[in-house]
Amino acid sequence: MNADDLFAVLGGILAVILLVFVGTGAIPVVSAAYTFLAIPVHAVVNHYRKAAPYTPRVAIVIPAWNEGAVIGASIDRLMALEYPLESLRLYVVDDASTDDTPDVVRRKAKQYPGNVFHLRREKGGEGKAHTLNHGIRVVLEDDWMQALLVMDADVIYTPNSLRRMTRHLADPAVGAVSAYIREGSKDKNYLTRFIALEYVLSQPAARRAQNVLGAQACLAGGAQLHSRENLLAIGGQIDTSSLAEDTITTFETQLKGRTVVFEPLAVVLAEEPGSIDALWKQRLRWARGNVTVTSRYRNIWFRPSKDHKLGTISFGIVWFSLWLLPIAMVLSSIGLVGLLLLQSDLATVLFRALWITAACTFTFTLALAVQLDGELTRKTWREVLTFPGIISMLVMLTAFFPGLLLEWLPSLFGAQLTETGLFWITLSIYIWISVSMLGAWLARRIEKTRVGRVLSPALIYLVGYGSLLCAITFDSYIKELRHAEAKWDKTEKTGRVTA
Amino acid sequence: MIDHTPPAGDPRHPGDAFLQAEIDENRAGERALVPKTVIAIAFVVLLVVVRELFFA
């Protein structure tokens, strides 16, 4: 073999590797399309057939640390739920609060005797799971409780939400039920509107699909209803060893052979972070928790089982597509740039195939999502139109309508791109998906500066909310590799949520 | 999200008949997911048609 042949073989091998890299970028896109195509199946495959009128005795456990501003109103609203009062008990676990939380809860305990109980932890700050377990231990001391509702202090349960959750527990095969956590801040800003839209995509949309596929990834922390039998089966407590206690509880429920049901019509309103920094801390906690989950359950992935659906190929692809999305984005960019530098015609073909698939998937998922919660998405129309990011949308346009931006638009001004100019623009387009994460990182860095107050929102609209979430996931990889301390950062709540 | 469930007489104790009717109504409401999906797919088809007609 002479040198030319050797280079040809090496070039071929390199091209195949780059091809695989580009292909990884398609996996999350196809996974999202697959998930959303399962949603209409929920018209037939749902749990309503096995649901029945059922109002068990429900013990509600609320972890509370310095929630004095919101806890009183939360208790009043829970006591006003459309649910038999004699079947409701509310245990507020005061996690060594230093504000007036104890006084407020004691007053409410007097106002609702036999329904509201104040539990005090003198040593606090160990995290939500420890606080919940304090309450759960008390609740399990007698046989009164038939179902346990775990929630956050500041969320608002709509009046019919609890009874819409309990009806699924009439089926003994169901271990836990979750509700639709809806962003409910009364003074929404651009970020809470993006989060609101994200929650529509991830809950009434994606979790309906997970109902169909038979495996739920996570019970919402603010709305977890467990049967007593399920709670005892998973050890009678919430996992305290990680930052992902919600997901671990969800997995354990399903591994014990019980079903987890998402009820899209039980609506719970929650206050979500209004700044990138607060969102970053919250999601970093979630992302690092998911690293623990992925590692702890390494023996179930892609191993189908008769007892649960967590090991199915489809669930594995959905899980890893989200968890490894930033890596897929970077690999895809490397692949495209590599093929471009190799002067391979495949670069253009693959770029178009990838981004046209992405454009179709975005269009489909967003068009479906806006119909699933029309009331909310009418208020977030700007975020619907720019959800992928304005620049990513231009990239999609370039792929979808070749010639529109690179030939027709310049010709309107009597200009024409030179070959060098076209190369650099193509290169920029190919690396954009990775660079967008840097834009999101920059938005966080400058958020608290004077210029950042205007520039940060503009950057998020430009790079896309998805890129922000990917940047946070990327940060979680770095923190894990550095073995950075995993601490519980409570998301700051200010009582902005409104019914 | 449109909720067609009628208000119960006694919201705390609406009775099994009401609760069952609510379940049946919610179950029937899920059928709307099919036309909603068709509408969403129609948007994608429209994009593809425009591409094929004007940019192929």
Image (tube, coloured by chain):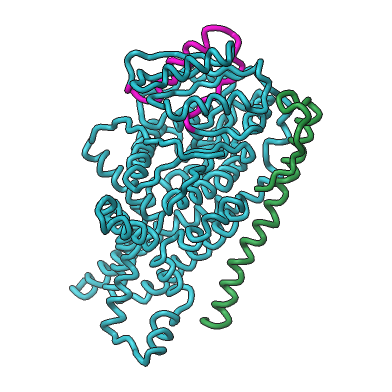
Chain colours: A cyan, B green
- Counting labels gives 0
Q: Position of residue A423 (x, y in %)?
A: 29, 78
Q: Which corner quadrant holds the N terminus of chain A?
A: bottom left
In the figure, B16 relative to B37: above or below? above
Q: Is A311 part of what is drawn in magenta?
A: no
Judged from this view, the residue extending furthest toward the right is B17
Image quarter for residue A68? top left
Is residue A63 shown left or right of residue B11?
left
**Residue nearest the viewer, comparing A231 with A257:** A231
Q: Residue at x 68, y 47 (%)?
A: B2
Q: Which corner quadrant holds the C terminus of chain A?
A: top right
**Residue nearest the viewer, comparing A399 with B9:** B9
Q: Position of residue A252 (x, y in %)?
A: 49, 26
**Residue nearest the viewer, comparing A186 with B8:** A186
| Magenta span of residues | A125-154
In the figure, A112 relative to B31: above or below? above
Judged from this view, the residue extending furthest toward the top is A142
Q: Residue at x 70, y 46 (%)?
A: B30
